[in-house]
Amino acid sequence: MRHFIFFPPEASEYARHIDWIYFGLIGISVIIVGLVVVLMVSFGIRYRRGSPAVRGRLPEWVSRDVEIGWTVGTLFAFVFIFWFAAATFITTIGATPNALEIHVVGKQWMWKIEHPNGVREINELHVPVNVPVRLVMISQDVIHSFFLPALRIKQDVLPGRYTSESFTADKTGIYNLFCAEYCGTDHARMGGRIDIMTKPDYQKWLDAQPGAHNLAEKGRQLFVRLGCAGCHFEKGHTRAPDLAGVYGSYVRLANGRTVRADEAYLRDSILQPARDIVAGYQPIMPSFKGTVSEDQIFDLVAFIKSYSGSGEAIK
Amino acid sequence: MSRATTYSAEEAALREPWEDIARQRQAVEMGMWAFLASEILFFTGIFAGYTIYRSTYPEAFWVAGGHTSLFYGGTNTAILLVSSAAMGIVPSAARWPSLGSFARTMLWVAALLGIAFLVLKGFEYAEDFDEHLFPGPDFEIHERGAQLFFAFYWCVTAIHAIHLIIGIGLVARLAIAGTRDPRWFSQTPAVQATALYWGLVDVIWTIVFVILYLPGRGS
Amino acid sequence: MTDAVLGDTLPHDVTTFDKGYLGDGHTLRSWLFTTDHKRIAILYAVTITIFFFIGGIAIALVRIELVTPAQDFVTADEYNRLFTLHGIVMVWFFLVPSIPTTFGNFLLPMMIGARDLAFPKLNLFSWYLTIIGGALTIYMLLAGGVDTGWTFYTPYSSIYSNSHVIAAAMAVFVAGFGTIATGVNFITTIHTMRAPGMTWFRLPLFVWAMYTVSVVIVLATPVLAMTLLLMTLERFFGVPIFNPNEGGDPLLFQHLFWFYSHPAVYIMILPAMGVVSEVIPCFARRRLFGYDFMVYALIAISVIGFFVWGHHMFVSGQSAYANLVFSFLSFIVAVPSAIKVFNWTATLYRGQITYESPMLYSFGFVGLFTIGGLTGLFLASIPIDIHATDTYFVIAHFHYVMVGGTVSAFFAALHFWWPKITGRMYPEAWARFAAILMFFGFNFTFFPQFIMGWAGMPRRYGSYPPEFQIYHVLSSAGAAVLAIAYLMPLAYLTWSLRWGRRAPDNPWRATGLEWQTSSPPPTHNFEKLPIVENEPYDYHPRGYVDQEHEAAGTAESPQKGGEQR
């Protein structure tokens, strides 16, 4: 890496777009600061004490009209900048379809990263170029923040709640990864790098990693080991709801509400089963809080997402 | 402050830098209202937290609310309301020299009712401890979110109790100083200020009663 | 521009120099039990000066550590404690109390023509609360410090930190009630103690600033107090309020904290705006441009300032739609600040400007505040903020506002009212040099931080990748310059206490009521309470025309009755 950077690398279309806004704002700021400085200096010189400048009176209305003028002018300028920036932000709201989903667990003071095929790495994130990537993140202890300067994205990683950030890198290379939310002693070392690779390189890298299980397969094994299968795969589903195809569907709850079964819902149902009971079932499921780690929950959720209910292989 | 031998009631109550007791009274009242605004925002912080969690865990708050003691909560609410009534008479009564001792009696009534409230609160706390309602590993209710409810229960009631203790101190001080110098008592703005503060403590309690004791009751 | 202090031309009898309120007693007791608002202001000034240097030493050590990329001067834990100490001390024991408790305390009653604040004993009590808070801070420091950052984010502070969080939180809690007491006192004083004729729209802008800031203090500080109290109870008794393991919301603390701490930014900057609005008209010899609009701007800032806290949380995981609303409101709150900058600039138009050191500091304020404000617009833009938040870009931004803005204004006020407070003139040449040095030292320190922040350097890092070193070295070098610039006034102002020339009553020939009494003022401020008949900042043309200039006849006479309002 270079030993001097004036400007962070731009590794995505989005990053270039943000920089464009940034330069726009700098341009506006330079104009405003320039205006203020030029006025102050020129007034300061022209109207210094004893200068021969003319100092006639100002009619009353001048003051009022000028005030209203620059209040309205500033207001329009600022609302324009708001629109200019917010418009870009709005495009980033919402899910990215077909994104490569990578799971991130933050803990004091490391990033644990898990790829869809079960490959794990620490403090390094390998991603393929030109593929939409979605990071689903959670913290095991305090609040962290997953910051990728080259992609101009940052998202706090919270304990007890999933957050996510998405990007599509379009330039290969190795860039910084930082924790941006202060998290204790080794906060400054809680970082690493993001390695953006070509698709073949990424595949080669994945294949070379040990422990490449299918994530869903790992989840399936865990599912059996924890005894979930006893109720959830029982014929007739009298004790526990069928999980086939549940991910993404709408579930009716006992209290009459309907929720979408997304990652957060599945996670809550494992940790706090009594909270959102599916209509028609008794709250008999024990909580797995403290029994399963955040990584294991990712595996379980991956399994539930993939499970289509063809009754295969659960024995 | 004038220390002449023949000083009027106004002079007895007048403090630096004021030259006019009416103005001083106006200022003290204004200052007290500003402070009460601050106090209201103080409690708003905790009530905001309560509101957010109650909307997150409606069932747990419902269940946990049922574990509070309606007997103690209700009795204490009645006690504070009566004390407020007693306190409400004081500012007007204190201005009449003939009613000065009556006003001071009412102050003592309010203070004693405040103490009664604290005693009952103590019994209630003891009972809550026995029922394992203090958040921790052997907490009574297993519903997720119920611990949050009781965290608020303990924090709000304790903070309110501290306010009440300060209130009792202020009321007692006013009553004692008023007995020593009845002329001062008839004019001092401290009477109105103390009554305002007492009113706030009671109003806060009625909110506390509604949000902590009433969930989980009735159908 | 002449170097001579204007006061030279005014008559004053040195032999009958009256020590005013300073002569009321020399014992420690006469200070510690005083209820004179002027003496309490001095107590506060001493207190915050001590804390300013404690916070300064902490950051000096931080800047030394940051000269090299490796963690080599202090350990990571020590580093975390140092920047936390710097933040806590500078925010709550310097910036928040700085201008209100010193200049506000000293000047507010005099500016409205009163003998004291409404509640003198409460005023002393609030100083004692500040001292208790300060003592807790010192205890916390000696016991080993606290490492949560000044923001005390949970669950780190409530569960994970192994440092003296409770002492630190209680220090802030107690000092917070000190500022609330001051705020209540100011509001009541301004409402009930204005001199006859001192209508609301004749109040000097400094008084308006004190009024708006007091309202913000009274309404925002209690929320912080409750938040820190709950955090402390959670840490001490284990009752889950914010604990995510028991279902607590990880963002609740942040919402409550920033509900205070964003208005707190205005608590720090509004008084500075008030100071500059006094200084610029005085040295421009010109009525403040757009007085009414300046007042409305102060009110607008303090009201809208309550509804923008969410812009600190764009990446926290709060709803994207909440982000949009907070972003929009943050742009709106910037408008009145911009109006103020334009008005200060326009005040110079057709003035008779001289450049004494308070004016130099005020020019510095306007420039640096403008940059601080504009970079605030960057951070109000959500996609820019997502990249820049929690980096040095934010550090640079708020130091431009807090240090470039508030501290510059603090020094402007210190020099402007020094003759009134102490009865002595300070050495003008040294003061001008310090003002210029401070301006350059400041930019030298903080401008590189904008660049490295955008380049991706996160804040609160004791070690960092080597590509950022150049900026850290520049910044640390600038900090050394800045440190000298801050030590200089300490030296020459102290010197002036003993050897400075006696100050006349109104050395700057300013208009405010505080200048109509003696320097230093008598115990009860005025021999006879004033009656106000003039508009504020009545510099031009009645009454305060520059005589020399008139005599020289160089310009069209401004004195031909009633030309300027």
Image (cartoon, helix red, strand yellow):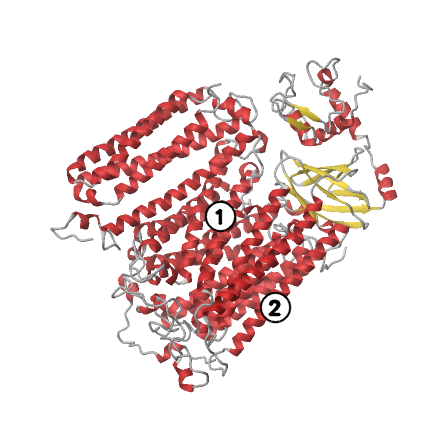
Q: Residues within 10 Å of mark 2 (few under 14, many from 20)?
A: few
Q: Residue A169 appears at what percent x and percent y? A: 78, 47
Which residue corresponds to the image point at 37% horizontal and 53% vertical from the top-left?
Answer: C186
In this rendering, position of residue A19 left or right of residue C42: right
Q: Is residue C509 left or right of residue A182?
A: left
Share a chain, discs 2 and 1? Answer: no
Left or right: B171, with C132 as reference point: left
Percent coordinates x, y for residue C342 in the rendering: 53, 65
Q: Quadrant of residue C101?
A: bottom left
Res. A277 image quadrant: top right
| Circle count | 2
Can you give x and y, in whole percent of width and height, for residue B145 in the image?
A: 55, 27
Can you identify the residue that label 1 sits on?
C141
Residue type, mark 1 in image: Leu
Up the image or down, A299 lies above or below C387; here it is above
Is residue C362 at all visible to an observer of this figure? yes
Q: Amino acid at mark 2?
A: Gly
Chain letter belonging to callout 1: C
Classify C281 as above or below B113. Answer: below
Q: Depth check: give the residue in front, C471 or B80.
A: B80
